[in-house]
Image (cartoon, rainbow, N blue to C red):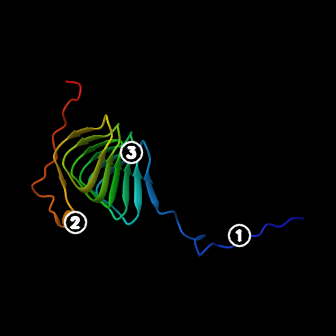
Amino acid sequence: MFTQKNPAPLNGTANKMPNLNMISEGTSVKGTINSKSDIRIAGRIEGEIVCKGKVIISSPAEIEGNISSIEADVAGKVRGILKITGKVTLRNTAQMIGDIITKSLVVEEGAFINGSCRMSKQDIVENLPSKGFQRAELVNQNS
């Protein structure tokens, strides 16, 4: 009786996949992750993350390794070096154990940082070597 037509694609977007990668809570990855688009992580990563977009680290996430991206929003635990050409936001639940190299830094009250921070213009951040920056050892916050 009634027939449904497939809607016409808007600007050719109907056949494209979303530009967000997700690693869910309960998922573990060991190795290097390379992404050309944004990535949201709620699981555990042991290895390097290289992203041409934004890295979103949710509160249950645990990252052990270096992260290079354009922007980072951290609410979980990171043990490594953040080399971000744009802005880093550390949410109140963030635990950053390691060094930060970035253009801009926003830290909410309650965020924990154990490491050093170097802030420079974007082109300088891109060309700064991570050498000389070290991952800090995990310390017990309760002591």
* Quarter of the figure with residue 48: bottom left
Q: Could you say whether the residue bearing mark 2 is in a helix, strand or loop? A: helix
According to the picture, the residue beneath numbered tag 3 turns out to be 43
N-term mark: 2 or 1: 1
Q: What's the mark number on residue 62? A: none
Q: Nearer the viewer, mark 1 or mark 3?
A: 1
Type of amino acid at the residue the image marks with label 3: Gly
Quick check: 131 left or right of 51?
left
At label 1, the amino acid type is Pro
Please say if 56 is above or below 10. above
Q: Residue at x 59, y 75 (%)?
A: 12
Secondary structure of the residue carrying tag 1 is: loop
Identify the residue under disc 1: 7
**Residue 11 in the image: above or below residue 21:** below
**Are dots 2 and 1 in contact, CB under 8 Å?**
no
Q: In front here: 57 or 21?
A: 57
Kindly state the secondary structure of the residue where label 3 is placed. Answer: loop
**Mark 1 to mark 3: distance in Å?**
36 Å
Tell us which disc is closer to us: 2 or 3: 2
Q: Nearer the viewer, residue 88 or 137?
A: 88
Question: Earlier along the polypeptide chain: callout 2 or callout 3?
Answer: 3
The percent coordinates of residue 115 (x first, y second) are 17, 43
Q: Position of residue 72 (x, y in %)?
A: 33, 53
Which residue type does callout 2 highlight? Glu
The residue that appears at 44% across and 53% down in the rendered structure is 22
Write down the quadrant of residue 38 in the picture. bottom left
Identify the residue position indicated by label 2 in the image.
126
Residue displayed at 69% across by 73% down? 8
For mark 1, does the 10 Å Cα neighbourhood hold few (<14), some (14 to 19), or many (20 or more) residues?
Answer: few
At a point 19% along the width and 65% down the height, the residue shown is 124
Seen in the image, is 75 located left or right of residue 81? right
